[in-house]
Image (spheres, rainbow, N blue to C red):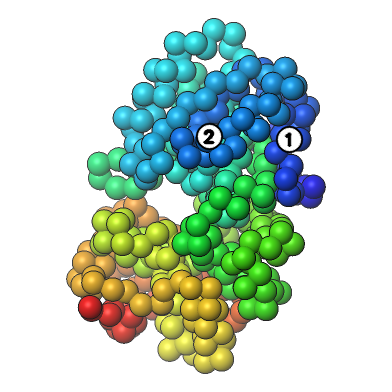
Amino acid sequence: MRKLTVNLGRRSYDIVIGYKVLPEFGRLLRKLKIGSDAVVVTNPYIRKLYGDRLENSLKEEGFSVRFEEVPDSKTSKSDKMCLNLIKRIALYDEQRTLFIIAFGGGVIGDLAGFLASIYKRGIPYVQLPTTLLAQVDSGIGGKVGIDWTYGKNLIGAFYQPKVVFSDISLLKSLNLRQLRSGLAEVIKYGIIQDEGLFRYIEKRYLGILKLNENDLLHIVLASSKIKAHIVQKDERDTEGKRMLLNLGHTIGHAIEAATKYTLYSHGEAIAIGTVCAAQIAKILRLLSPDSFQRIENLILKVGLPVKIQNVKLTEILKAQLHDKKFIGRKNRFVLQFIGRKNRFVLPVGIGKAEVRENVPLEMVKKVIKSRLECT
């Protein structure tokens, strides 16, 4: 097993990464002394695959274990589901030694983490991610929340887990589309901070797609290091450093919203958004044509989209203005409209990205339009 530490003072925690290490999970938790009653929030599919192994690992160390299942759907990340879980947990929470285990992908991690942050003013929770996207991105950093009527992640908090435990063998349950979706975030890390990681994916993408153990360990470890490093510098998105993690996300989120979250997975939308950002950087002569081509080619090689199908430009722009990062017409993170001025996270090389101001809005529109593909 490999171990990284997210250094946040009293909120510091480890990221533990290994292969077929789920049997060690209970022993690790016992050392943390976070409670004796585990509530595992998961979905029926993950429980069926791995629930017995997790339960055995916990019970061998003397933990009591209860499973709380939620549907395997994005709609589970809701206020209704969160309150329903609180109601169910409160019925048997008598010893006050309860903690939450988020056992699943990004939806489970966000929901269970937010539940832990508000139940009894906050109880311990741990992340046990089962998707590549959750292991390299959403499971690290303490951003938790639920969706609401008026938008995604509108209700949330920064609430750090006690540990992130990434067992690479759990990724064997992913279908190819889910794996590719997670790879979009790994490629993003290579673009913004680690050319070596980018080159590794260029060379080993077939092994990654075939779930080669060593390849998966390499990319999860490298990605987790980058995410941990950035979170340490800017835990709550107040210093501007964490903004780099949003490469591709403003346009990507707009694509998701414009298609009502049904046509593209999160990673697929982010892949398109990343190519758009790289294209803008190329037009502004911040990124060489060769580097742009490497970015687009790698995204295509791993099977992710670079074109937007069956969506109108006006729908994407409208969705972009309704993104949660906007206050009025100002975006605090990736794209900030001030009159006709804005700020964008743009790659300026493979392994380096910067926040650039005054990217012409018409250029952004032109790039998005060039990616539209009506069928």
Residue under the point 59% across and 81% down = 349
Residue under the point 63% across and 78% down = 202
Residue under the point 53% across and 73% down = 302
Residue furthest top in the image: 94
Q: Answer above or below: position of 140 versus 184.
A: above
Q: Answer above or below: position of 85 versus 276.
A: above
Local crowd at mark 2 within 10 Å, few (<14), some, or many (≥20)?
many
Do labels 1 and 2 touch, CB within 8 Å?
A: no
Q: In this rendering, does residue 301 appear at all?
A: yes
Mark closest to the chain's N terminus, 1 or 2: 1
Q: Quadrant of residue 332?
A: bottom left
Q: Nearer the viewer, residue 158 or 209?
A: 209
Residue under the point 68% across and 46% down = 167
Check disc 1 and give the amino acid type. Pro
Horizontal side, residue 118 vs residue 294: left or right: left
Q: Which mark is residue 47?
A: 2
What is the CA distance from the residue labelled 1 to the residue labelled 2?
Answer: 15 Å
Q: Answer above or below: position of 263 versus 373.
A: above
User: How far across and down, in percent of the image, does residue 3 sit?
Assistant: 77, 47
Q: Quadrant of the C terminus?
A: bottom left
User: How far across and down, in percent of the image, does residue 372 sit?
Assistant: 28, 79
User: How far across and down, in percent of the image, does residue 120 sit?
Assistant: 49, 18
Q: Quadrant of residue 86?
A: top left
Q: Which mark is residue 322?
A: none
Q: Which mark is residue 23?
A: 1
Element assignment for label 2: helix
Check disc 2 and give the amino acid type. Arg
Element assignment for label 1: helix
User: How far across and down, in percent of the image, does residue 75 sit?
Assistant: 33, 41
